[in-house]
Image (cartoon, rainbow, N blue to C red):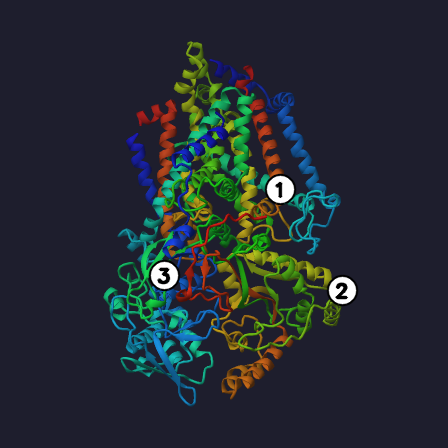
Amino acid sequence: MTATTITDATLAEQGTSLWQDAWRRLRKNRLALFGLAVLSTFIVIALVTPWIAPYAYDAQNLDLGASPPSAEHWLGTDIFGRDLLTQIMFGGRISLAVGFVATAVALVIGVTWGAVAGYMGGRVDAVMMRLVDILYALPFMIFIVLLMVVFGRNLLLLFLAIGAVEWLTMARIMRGQVQSLRQQEFVEAAISLGLSPATIVRRHLVPNALGPIIVYTTLTIPSVMLLEAFLSFLGLGVQPPATSWGLLISYGAETMEEYPWLLIFPGAALTLTLFSLNFLGDGLRDALDVRGSGD
Amino acid sequence: MWRFIAGRLLQAIPVILAVITVTFFLVRVAPGGPFDSEKAVIPEVKAALEAQYRLDLPLGQQYLAYLADLAKGELGPSFKYPGRSVNELIAAGLPATAELGAYALLVAVVLGGLAGVIASLKPNSAQDYIPMSVAMIGICMPTFLLGPLLVLLFGIHLEWLPVAGWGDMPGDKILPSLTLGAAYAAYTARLSRAGMLEVMSQDYIRTARAKGLPEWQVVTRHALRGGLIPVVAFLGPAFAGLLAGSFVVETIFQIPGLGRFYVQAAFNRDYTMILGTTVFLSTLIVLFNLLSDVLAAWLNPRLRAQFGEA
Amino acid sequence: MNPVFSLSARVFLACTLVACSTGESNVGQGNREGVFHVGNGSEPQGLDPHVVTGVPESKIIDTLFEGLTRKNPWTLEPEPGAAASWEFSEDLRVITFYMQPEGRWSNGDPVTAHDFVWSWRRALDPAMGNLYAYMLYPVENAEAYATGKLSDPEQVGVRALDDMTLQVTLNAPTPYFLQLMDHYSSYAVHRATIERFGKSTDRFTQWTRVGNIVTNGPFQLKEWQLNRRIAVERNPHYWDADVLRLNGVVFYPTENIVSEERMFRVHQLHYTGDVPLNKIPAYRKLPNTPFVEAPFLGTYFYLLNTERPPLDDVLVRRALSLAVDREAVTRNVLYGSNNPAYSITPPGTLGYQPPQLFSYDPAEARRLLAEAGYPEGAGWPGLELIYNTSESHRKIAVALQQMWKDVLNIEVTLSNQEWKVYLDSVSEMNFQIARRGWIGDYVDPNNFLDMYISGGGNNNTGFSDPVYDDLILQQAPRAATEEERFALFYEAETRLMEQMPIIPIYTYASKHLVHPSVRGLPPNLMDFINVKYIYLDDVPLTEIELE
């Protein structure tokens, strides 16, 4: 009963008003705003880093070596005597780009794939999901090594490789959601109203499955940032002296006993990003949750 | 239900065959061969080695011969470890990895699931923020970082637990299980919280509440089922993925597991070992994805009805 | 009931259950029982001396098997092994080995000259696919047989005159030949055992398993758990069993050297195969430090592809080399454990002193680059440096990249490659600059210099100089005295370093953590362990507190 009313309401509304509504609700959520503010700040810093970084990112001072935070180097220096703050600023450019772009790729492919498979059901579903199984099982490392050999090394490829891996779980989650939503009254009502499958998927299934998808997305971004470091070790990804948060953290982990600041500060940058993403994600989820708004 | 399972098992055959075929050719196209080493290999020696491993045959024949062996259940001799068959290596590594994986999963489901459900009951309160913050730190904390941190704390400074080993000393299984489980626990916490919140706003929960059921019964009898669907969808492939994921933990803690074989096989270009572990892994993935789909169906009454009709 | 709480509760519970005792440490127990616990790098590929290659394998095989000689760990001079004595013929081409009268296999069979004849033929058999077959190439007709040009193994220059006398004929006098006699490629294997489990050249047999394997060394195989440990115990039939003071050795496949260091710190290991770079300063500061370092017979260098511009110009190659401040690299990146290298042969190899033609000279480097047509880096086409993924390779590459930028104002991009991809790039010469290391198989300049003969399998630079080839291949082996021979090597190496197809960076150092209870384990140039001399003192275990 409630569901049908809402469906009617959503049908009547234009997409824009749904988003306007969501934005109005999001603005009331202080944590979400905090997340948004932090992320925006990071992105702005990343954009202007080449002009505001305190040092050149590759300027070494071998005799200085690793030094703890000081007046000259606010966050200390690494074993080459390079300024850590500068490294984190430049690393953020790579990590944020990889995180957002690769996740977006995974999101688009995964959500579409999962929604179509879940909605169509039957054979289409079986074939699509078995393809996902096959991709899960392929030896990832060999795949990456080959990608590198065939296409050479570039950042675009890195995004694609990561996106190509991360969409699989996304597709499974989306499919599960759509499958369970499809059986519900408001979707059945939409079908009986004669709406096209594409419209139903876009208007009803995707928005209603957004909760877990948003959460999984916010989880994917940091894991993608760390995966990037692993790919760099295989030869794909950024090469020194360029760096990323994932690389800084893995280097820092090796010297955590000797030079803890090399782990703490890049780790803090990643953690802060993740927290902000989660606050924003939860806020968005609540804001978009039409049914939950009454609570 | 049974028809569904049987159907999926039937579908598994082409899936695994496809995985084998793609992998078989993929590894042979990858640069570097199993016998390349830092010092130049004399051509005659290389030829002799290739002959011993059938690498001198045309690709097509190698492929068919491999399938024929596979049909007999033989995964072939390892390139890296002469005198060992891939079957033997997998059998040697599996017990430790399976045990580690099971403990990690336990940590993930119990700690993560509990944290997520508790957090979802009072969203945007301390009861929500504290477990979720811990979970987020868990996600940020890759195993290669968490493992050494736990070792430094409990192994070196407190001297409570061994720093490495598996079944060699009392308590040496605790740190690896926690390390591997933590990442999954963090995901489980986040996903179950989201799933629960999603479900709690559904009509049937309102109905249940309207019927006057106590809140804990609403949660355990009704909400939990639906709320855990995303977790189940995640854990299916995640458990199969533990095999690859346990590599880092196995290396940090010197655990004689399959993860080390799986990852090193790729680095060594140990063709038969890559294929063997991949066949094994793909079987696991198919099975666990099936299991997670069945579980999801069982958790979702509407889908269950659908299976009943089929 | 948040996860942190339940987590610590779980740990606490677990701790109470096991009374928080982690049992007696390996070192404590080992000291009492005479068992030496060794961190050994990785799981050995196998234990067949003619099949495997690699350092972890050799450490285990050296305890199980014994060649004709065994090196003294202090002097590296050959001492009697399976052979009790030996003599050279007048022309130094024929060596007669007299077998140990009491030499026994671990099943009690006598070790005879026939065992060595059969084993060397097996090691050289082309069907064997033995990667180290070339170690026996100084033996007459060995190379021809191993490469299939000669099918009759009888013609290989190794014969049993009787059960106890082995005669080896060489192609030419080979000053380092006795050194090869304790390399595992020249070890004897037990024929009856191998034939019981399959063909002699079969790589897939089970003859090396516990219960099957028969060996002639001081120890025999007791336990072999994949990726967990390999344990050896005394061989009761060993001819020199009386001098042994260890009762056993346990090898651990410690792939992760950071974990290995932690195992050492909690007394789980007596000896580590390596030490993480970052831990070196802290260990050095310890009183009575367990950190042991010594020069090691190897050189770390960069290969320059002389067939690709701009490295086809010797001026550019020399400019790059002169711009490298090796002192700064070894001091700051490697924590002073290694010496800067200015030649391919490590200084002091058997008394040979290589030429040093250059040193760090930024002004001269700039001048050379300008002369080559890139003044102040103008018009520089760019260069790519490849290295296989590793922390220390990366650090050195990053440091050099910046030195080249600072001194020469040129860009060099770095590119790390996965191990097998890197090997492929190097052997196909698909690179401009590539990181490389060479560790000597035996102590002789020849082992380093014969890499750069024209078309040599390990040349990988395109360097080709007929005069060099003549010096190494023709003149040096015929030199009358060692002095003359070293003079020829010096001349050849001077030609090599003038052309600079490689940029030497540092000479290797062996680095280990050794528990104070371990005795009779001196550091040496070959990083060689002779288990016969090792014993364990029951010293009290003291806590290792870093920093």
Mark 2–mark 3 contact, CB under 8 Å? no
Mark 2–mark 1 contact, CB under 8 Å? no
* Residue B80 numbered mark, or none: none
Name the chain letter of the residue that bears numbered label 2.
Answer: C
Image coordinates of residue B240 in percent, x first then y, are: 40, 41
Q: Amino acid under label 1?
A: Pro
The answer to whether marks 2 and 1 sit on the same chain is no
Image coordinates of residue A10 in percent, x first then y, are: 55, 20
Residue extending farthest to the bottom is C90
Q: Amino acid under label 3?
A: Gly
Front-most of residues A71 and B35: A71
Q: Amino acid under label 2?
A: Glu
Q: Tag 3 or tag 2, which sits nearer the N-term?
A: 3
Question: How many numbered circles does the render carry?
Answer: 3
Is C139 left or right of B193, judged from the image as shown?
left
Mark 2 or 3, closer to the camera: 3
Q: Which residue lies under the disc numbered 1?
A: A266
Image coordinates of residue B289 in percent, x first then y, are: 38, 37
Name the chain letter of the residue that bears numbered label 1.
Answer: A
Front-most of residues C152 and B151: B151
Which type of secondary structure does the marked residue at label 3 adopt? loop
Is A87 left or right of B234, judged from the image as shown?
right
Which type of secondary structure does the marked residue at label 2 adopt? helix
Q: Which residue lies under the disc numbered 3?
A: C46
* Residue C376 numbered mark, or none: 2
> How busy is the neighbourhood of tag 3: few (under 14 within 10 Å), some, or many (20 plus)?
many
Q: Quadrant of residue C133?
A: bottom left
What is the spatial separation of the Cα atoms under label 2 and label 3, in whole angstroms?
54 Å
